[in-house]
Image (cartoon, rainbow, N blue to C red):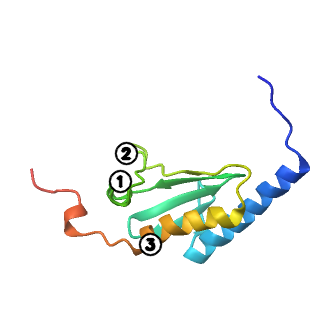
Amino acid sequence: MIVRKKSKRQLKAERRFVEVVTEFFTTLGARPGSFYDHALGTPAGLLHVSIHGNWIATRFDDVAQGRVFSESCGRPCNPYSGKWNFHFPDSLHPDAAIADLWYWFYRLMSWRPSHLSQPSTTG
């Protein structure tokens, strides 16, 4: 497998992406995480977040609640692991990524679970 070395320009763009996206999550209230870089309290439970060069790995701690939220917003997470990742092209400006993230995370942070979205306790 041939692996191309990243250019200085691409490495700089990736560092900028990480800086900008980290600032975005910090403004939402993210704090340092344990096994992911950050942890964000949300109405669907704790969301684990790690930011990479052009993508963001997230995972709902409460998979069932994450699934209820993410299916309701039209961008479902993995129903078994709770992973809800975001991938962006290398050429995308960080501000465009933030606009996309703002759309999804505004929906997440303003989501209010209803009694209908809670797991059933009756047999």
- Mark 1 neighbour density, 10 Å: few (under 14) some (14–19) many (20 or more): many
Q: Position of residue 66 (x, y in %)?
A: 38, 57
Q: CA distance from mark 3 to mark 1?
A: 15 Å
Element assignment for label 2: loop
- Would you name the residue on which mark 3 appears? 109
Picture coordinates of residue 75, whole percent (x, y): 42, 54
Q: Nearer the viewer, residue 100 or 120?
A: 100
Q: Is residue 71 left or right of residue 36?
A: left
- Quarter of the image holding residue 22? bottom right
As drawn, 58 above or below 106? above
Residue position marked by numbered label 1 in the rendering: 67
Q: In the rendered structure, which amino acid carries the disc numbered 3?
A: Met
Numbered disc 3: secondary structure: helix
Q: Is residue 110 left or right of residue 84?
A: left
Residue in the image at 64% along x and 51% along y: 88
Q: Which mark is residue 79?
A: 2
First-in-chain label (2 vs 3): 2
> Which residue of the protein is positioned furthest toward the left in this rendering?
123
Badge 1 vs badge 2, beta-carbon distance below 8 Å: yes
> Of the residues under marks 1 and 2, which one precedes in the sequence?
1
Q: Within 10 Å of the Cα at label 2, are there few (<14), some (14-19), or many (20+) other Cα atoms?
A: some
Task: Give percent across and percent down for residue 10.
Answer: 83, 50
Which residue is more in the foreground, 70 or 40?
Answer: 70
The answer to whether the residue labelled 2 contacts the one labelled 3, judged by CB atoms less than 8 Å apart, is no
